[in-house]
Amino acid sequence: MGPTLTDVAKRANVALSTASRAFSDPGRVGPDTLRKIRMIAQEVGYEPVSTRASGAVASSDHATIAVVVPDIANPVFAAFVKAAQGQGWHSRHTVVLADSDFDPDRERAAIAHLVGRVDGIAVCSSRLAADEVVELAGRVPLVLVNRVTDAADCIVADATEGLRQTVDYLTALGHRRLAYVQGSALSWSNRHRVAVVAELAASHDLELEMLDWQTETVDGGAAAAARVVASGATAVIAHNDLVALGVIGGARALGIRVPEDLSVVGIDDIPFAAVARPALTSISTPNARAGALSLELLGRAASGDRPAPRTLRLPTHLVVRASTGPVRARRT
């Protein structure tokens, strides 16, 4: 990892914003301080952003911040990126995007490439271990979204309340046997949701069929539909809305009606959930809020405001629609 502007600022014993102005707006820096900063930069081999990326000039007011997501085509991550870009525009920061395509090696390479080229990195739903992401980022300000560590700022969509509302609702509808379709084993959100669902099912004395993970897509849900039906569950919770929509389509192909024979609940409440047929009951997660908050935290860090790492937990809630209903005798 190459030296960063933070390294230069520390060695010169000046604020990060002062070190940044030495390259972006030198007229605002005293001649002695300017000479000292540039000499140290040369000694440590720091290359200013203005020469690293054509036209990109970082300062406390104009930072370049990278957003790394696993799949920009997924509406969840699209909402995250759009909100991050909106916050970046409002704060006069440049936002660059990297899509890892759910590939840990690609994610690793992207983060390594960005370090030394940007003033902050937000990594959403990483497929790498948190400690590895922190190590890759080095001294570059980092925000981890839907991943938890004590070594960096973290923002998580806490599914606990949304899942509690869901299990309470399904229980009130008479469901006693549930299925859960898992997401990727590399996903922190999946592990968190599995643990919460298992605890809630036990506390309600419900039977729970925990199905193995599928790709987090409509096709993955369609592939899981037969196993959901075979489990005998009268209601299923899917890792995300795309999987849930796939389960509905797959169940329909098997002659299973939703919600008459099977109630289906997704997670994320993407825009497609409200217009699906039937409209999808889903747990709303604050993806846009997480995107804007990530940029807000990284913008502060780029200005030198770097408090001790903290974890911010954003709440979730259930949105009831037509894909869930009371238990009825399933047709043969």
Image: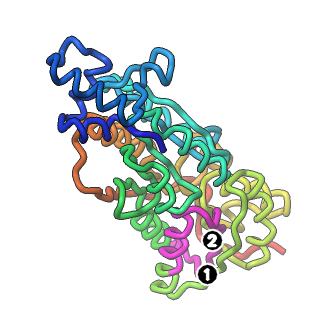
Please report the residue visible at 37 percent of the width from the left and 36 percent of the height from the top.
Answer: 44
Q: Secondary structure at mark 2?
A: strand
Residue 231, x across and y down, in percent: 74, 78
Q: Check if residue 171 falls in the magenta segment.
A: yes
Q: Kindly identify which residue carries mark 2.
A: 180
Q: Amino acid at mark 1?
A: Leu
Q: Earlier in the sequence, mark 2 or mark 1?
A: 2
Give the numbered dot on residue 157: none
Q: Secondary structure at mark 1?
A: strand
Q: Amino acid at mark 2?
A: Tyr
Q: How many numbered discs, if any?
A: 2
How far is disc 2 from disc 1 in space, using C-alphas? Answer: 7 Å
Please report the residue visible at 59 percent of the width from the left and 69 percent of the height from the top.
Answer: 326
Q: Kindly identify which residue carries mark 1.
A: 208
Q: Can residue 167 be spotted in the picture?
A: yes
Give the extent of the magenta segment. 170-198
Q: Are marks 2 and 1 in contact (CB under 8 Å)?
A: yes
Considering only vertical position in the picture, is 165 above or below 220? below
Residue 118, x across and y down, in percent: 44, 33
